[in-house]
Image: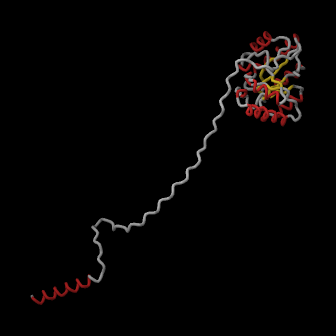
Amino acid sequence: MKARVALAYALGLVLTLAGCAHPVRAVVAAGHPTPATSAPSPSPKPPAAPKPSRTTPTKPPLRPKPTTLPAGLRRTTGVRPVALTFDDGPSPAWTPKILDRLRAAHVTATFCLVGSEVRRHPELVRRIVREGHQLCNHSWRHDLDLGRRPVNEIRADLARTNKAIQAAAPGAAIAFYRQPGGQWTPEVVAVAKDLGMRPLHWSVDPQDWDKPPAGTITKRVLKAVRPGAIVLLHDGGGDRAATFAACPGVIADLKRRFGIVRLR
């Protein structure tokens, strides 16, 4: 019995000495991961430089709406015969039909052209010129407030429209400018004149832009017309079926009572 005790003691001593030859290992509880060695923290990135902010330039305020017409507008022919004017074209739907009416009646008119429509339909501008009608600048996109904008914007708009008309019909004269809606200002009158165009207004407006029946258009024109009148009608800007239908009666009556003249 004593021999067994001595043998066990000797064996334990050997195991103890053998264990001391290895590094001590940390004991980790079951089910828990061994803690990882902590890596050095990355140095913080320098903050990005702020990007310059983009701000939309503030547009200058519009001048007040005019309450009266400025001086210098052409409102009559200056002679007994009257003149016909057609606005907001050229329109592929209605301008050719209006031109057919005028040709059948052997009369000429003035066509006030919107620049964006000229760019789309240059062939109609060429036909207008070819058939002896007068041309008038009516702004690039029929901007009712154009006359209230800065003078440099007015000039750019009118010049752009003239350029489109000249591209469609090289060498054609653009004698007049008509302000959309008749909302004239002294500034737009001055710019038009500086570009070699006379400001063209009217004296008879049957409001055909509002699409009344053809009979109403005819009655309004014939009631309001006087010697030397300038009549406002439309060949573009929408459905002009009523204006087209009114043309034969209006033209025949005006020719009989006053005559119809090409503006000069």
- Residue 37 appears at what percent x and percent y? 38, 68
- Residue 69 appears at what percent x and percent y? 75, 18
Between 104 and 223, the one lying in front of the other is 223
Left or right: residue 180 versus residue 166 is left
Q: Name the quarter where the C terminus is drawn.
A: top right
Question: Is residue 116 visible from the viewing direction of this image?
Answer: no
The residue at 55%/50% (across/down) is: 50
- Residue 105 appears at what percent x and percent y? 88, 19
Left or right: residue 72 versus residue 35 is right
Question: Is residue 174 visible from the viewing direction of this image?
Answer: yes
How many dots with numbers? 0
Residue 257 in which image quadrant: top right
- Residue 41 appears at what percent x and percent y? 43, 63
Left or right: residue 187 versus residue 15 is right
From this view, report whether residue 244 is shown above or below residue 38.
above
Residue 233 in which image quadrant: top right
The residue at 72%/25% (across/down) is: 238
- Colour logic: secondary structure
Residue 108 in which image quadrant: top right
The residue at 30%/75% (across/down) is: 25
Between 127 and 205, the one lying in front of the other is 205
